[in-house]
Amino acid sequence: MHRKILIGLAVLAFSLLAAAQSQWALQQSTLTYVVTHPLHHIEGVSHAARGKGICQANECEFLIAAPVKSFGSGDSNRDLHMIQAVRGAEYPMVTVRTRIPQSELKSGSIHADLQVQFAGQTANYKQVPFQVTAEGKNLRLTGTIPAKVSDFRLTPPSLLTIPIKNDIPVRVDMLWSPAE
Amino acid sequence: MNPQRIRFVYAVAILAIFIAFPDASRAQATGATLTGTVTGPSGQAVPGAKISVKDVATGKSTPAQSDAAGVYTVPNLAPGDYEISVSADGFSTTTQKVTVAAGASQTLNVTLTSGLSLESLGFPNSQTQANPQEQARLNRRTHMLKVHQTLGLITTAPMLATVITGTFAGGRATSSTNRDLHVGLGSLTAGMYFTTAYFAIAAPKIKGEKTHGPIRLHKALAWIHGPGMVLTPILGALAYQQKSRGEKVHGIANLHGPVAIVTAGAYGLALLSVSIKF
């Protein structure tokens, strides 16, 4: 009789553990896109990203999003041109989704598959390397997304009739903390 | 009433009920079972998911819950159309439609999507919704500013030529041909300049736009080369008249050259301010 009760309790405990989930919240972030033109090297920075991660069954799913308008390059005219070129009023958000095994969320380097939605298009980047650094309970993720203008079927913006280069890498620096 | 007669009346009554409500009698006899597994986006079982099976015809809902393996079962369903709503912590609620056949055991597996959404991140709808009107304004603005940029670049050629020919038009030993060439180039420059300016001034303004960065210098310099482009031809016309009368250029007409130089300088600087990073 006691044995049956113990087995029952063990099954119940296992079920509860399987159902348990933990969450991560994005505390601080710096997203920087880099645009190269023969006359300019432009960096557009946003600190307005928000993000959340939900971990279940040893896998964490993350969603990070930032308003396209929140990127500033230090020149209002250029920023408006950028918003126009990437159809930022029609598609006002850039989002990144990824899944990372929970066991990899510790100091070291990880490779993540990213799904980026931007300018009405979805681009997938496989095995993007990120550096993870533990800061107390928090985790800092840094890396670069190797984005290209052509990934999003955009017409490259031009200055003095010269278009920008196809590569627009996005540097990522995010601080995540465990959420209740 | 004798017992035989009573049995006969009961039999007739039961037969009448079966004839009047054929569906009800069939429903009792043909209860179906709906079963399935609730999984997450990566295929993991979702225990404790709340399932609501709503009969579309009657609006009646039958609740159920998935077990440790994510399996749920809803027995005794009458045949018909149902709406199955599945919810679980950390996932988005999913609703699916299913038609249950009489007496069948039907399987409906449900895959829940992640509960992560822009709303769950706290972005207001106003920030995440598309604004096609603003996109149209931005497109028009960019188109007009591209024309402004191209025309502005082209204008530098006649402007430079006007400045160079000006050095031969104002001296003592000038000919009317030199002056006419200078006037012709100056007129072309003025025409192109004001057309260029039109495309910048008429470009749609964007709500909430705050000017900052090198574009501020570009715009500020327009307050120098704009009035300069108005004054220069007026002063030039005065100087031309004086020269044509065989007089030495004098009075306010003397300012034609310096004003033209300042105007051309401000124009060149405005061009550089948006072309080269300082």
Image (spheres, coloured by chain):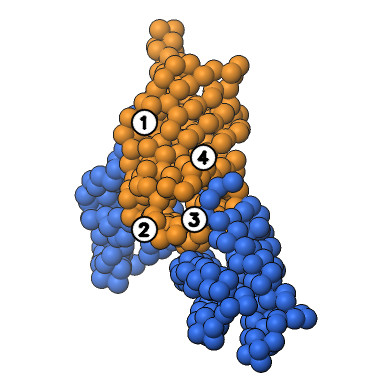
Chain colours: A orange, B blue
In this rendering, do the residues under marks 2 and 4 share a single chain? yes
Q: Measure the C-alpha gap from mark 2 to mark 4.
A: 20 Å
Q: In terms of secondary structure, where does tag 1 sit?
A: strand
The amino acid sitting under disc 3 is: Met
Q: Measure the C-alpha gap from mark 4 to mark 1.
A: 16 Å
Q: Is residue A165 above or below residue B135?
A: above
Closer to the chain start, of discs 3 and 1, is: 3
The residue lying furthest to the front in this view is B173
The residue closer to the viewer here, A122 or B99, is A122
Q: Mark 3 highlights which residue? A: A82
Q: Is residue A136 above or below residue A56?
A: above
Q: Residues within 10 Å of mark 1 (few under 14, many from 20)?
A: some
Tell me, for residue B278, which label it has, or none.
none
Is residue A160 in view? yes
Q: Is residue B133 above or below residue A11?
A: below
Q: Mark 2 highlights which residue? A: A155
Label 2: chain letter = A
The residue lying furthest to the bottom in this view is B245
The image quadrant of residue B205 is: bottom right
The amino acid sitting under disc 2 is: Thr
Q: In terms of secondary structure, where does tag 4 sit?
A: strand
Mark 3 or 1, closer to the camera = 3
Q: Mark 1 highlights which residue? A: A128
Closer to the chain start, of discs 3 and 4, is: 4
Q: Mark 4 highlights which residue? A: A32
Going by the image, does A99 lie left or right of B200?
A: left
